[in-house]
Image (tube, helix red, strand yellow):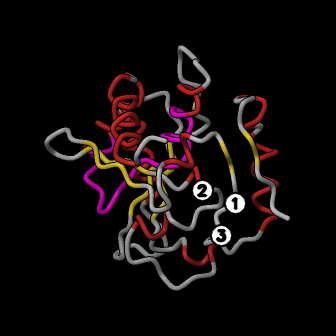
Amino acid sequence: MESDDDLQQQTCALLRTSPLHWQCLLAARELALPDWYLGAGFVRNLIWDHLHGYRHPTALSDIDLIYLDQRDPDGRRESEIEACARALLPGQNWEARNQARMHLRQRTPPFDTALTALSHWVELPTCIGVRLLADDRLLLVAPHGIAHNWSLEVRPNPHCRQGPALFTERVRAKRWQQLWPRLRVLWPA
């Protein structure tokens, strides 16, 4: 079993060698949002594609851009941020979400960081994000570890308070097992 550090390095190498992912990271950095990450399928899918031997990344249904801005607790700037991201990188479906309001969906106290918010997402392999720093280093975060992504096992996040029905619905609706047939879904009891 490889260490978390080794898996993080491999993930960063995948991100650096994917032209689309690198362009998205450059665009997101240019937006200069507070406490931001590109997360969920942006990183997770790239790992799964690699493990399945796919030569080209699976198309992203959206690019999850999260940030935490306490000055806009209602997320009123989200549409404006998405428009700016589309102007920087046309042809991509950007979904910007201010995590200052997402605690309501998770039924938790307000999040103090975007990383804390990300740690409550529905599936463990989805709880991953990356940020491009000013010196072009990648800051990869995976509050529950990155091995979940590399194991090809999908299990519910015990920290997500939305319940097992949402996990089941998401896995089926997103058709992950059709896209990545080697995935093992560990269904909630």
Figure quadrant of residue 8: top left
Q: Are marks 1 and 3 in contact (CB under 8 Å)?
A: yes
> Relative to 78, does residue 185 appear above or below in the rendering?
above
Q: Are marks 2 and 1 in contact (CB under 8 Å)?
A: yes
Q: Tell me the residue at 82%/45% (across/down).
A: 172
In space, the residues marked 2 and 1 are separated at their CA atoms by: 6 Å
Residue 70 at what x, y percent from top left?
36, 76
Q: Which residue is mark 2?
A: 124
**Foreground residue, 189 or 83?**
189
Residue 68 at what x, y percent from top left?
38, 67
**Foreground residue, 64 or 14?**
14
In space, the residues marked 1 and 3 are separated at their CA atoms by: 6 Å
Q: Which residue is mark 1?
A: 156
Q: Tell me the residue at 77%/61% (across/down).
A: 166
Three-letter amino acid code at the position of disc 2: Leu
Three-letter amino acid code at the position of disc 3: Pro
